Amino acid sequence: MSGRNRADQGFGLVEVVIAIFLLAVVAVAILPGLWQGISQSARQSSTATATRYLNALVEEARDAHSCSALNSIATPSPSATPLKDGRGRDLVVAGTVTNCSSGRAARLSLQITGDGKVLASTTALVYIP
C-alpha cells in the first residue's frame, strides 16, 4: 500500500474532536476577561447616570432663588419618582445646604448612592439673591 485511498483524504473524526476541544479551551480562557469587561461596563453606566443627574441638579439649583428651593433639591421628597440607572437599580440622592441666606452664596453638597456605594458627589456654591 504505497498510495492513499480517496477515503483517507480530509479531516477525520479524531482531528475534528481535537479542534473542538482546543476551541473550548480557548473559549473558557477568554470568559473571565469578557465577564469582567461586562461587569465594569455596567458599573460605569451607573456612574455616568449618577453624574449626569448631579449635573442636572446643580443646574436646577442655579435657577433656584430661595433657600427653600435649594433645600427641596438637596432632599427630594419620598413621593418623588425614584431615579434608576440603566440596569433598573434605584439610585438615592442625598444632600445638604449650608450658609443659606439672601445675598450670600450657599454651599450645596450632593451625592448619589447605589447599592450602598457612592457613585458620584459634588459640591457647588449657589448665589441666593
Image: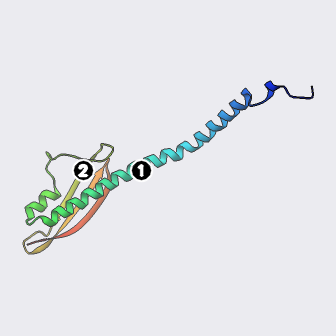
Circle 1 packing at 10 Å, graded few (<14), some (14-19), many (20+), is few
Direction front: furthest residue: 6
Secondary structure state at the residue bearing disc 2: strand
Residue 124 rendering spot, x and y as whole percentages: 22, 68
> Which of the two residues, 10 or 82, is positioned nearer the viewer here?
10
Point out the image quarter for the N terminus.
top right
Above/below status of 114 relative to 10: below
Circle 2 packing at 10 Å, graded few (<14), some (14-19), many (20+), is some
Q: In the shown orientation, is residue 59 left or right of residue 45?
A: left
Above/below status of 55 relative to 105: above
Residue located beneath label 2 in the image: 92
Q: In the shown orientation, is residue 65 left or right of residue 83?
A: left
Above/below status of 67 relative to 117: below
Tell me the amino acid under the disc marked 1: Ser
Task: Name the quadrant containing residue 89.
Answer: top left
Give the number of the mark in front: 2 or 1. 1
Residue shown at the point (11%, 68%) measured from the top left? 100
Residue 109 rendering spot, x and y as whole percentages: 22, 63
Residue 118 showing in the rendered view: no
Direction bottom: furthest residue: 103
Point out the image quarter for the C terminus.
bottom left
Residue located beneath label 1 in the image: 41
Residue 18 rendering spot, x and y as whole percentages: 70, 33
> Which of the two residues, 127 or 17, is positioned nearer the viewer here?
17
Residue 111 rendering spot, x and y as whole percentages: 26, 58
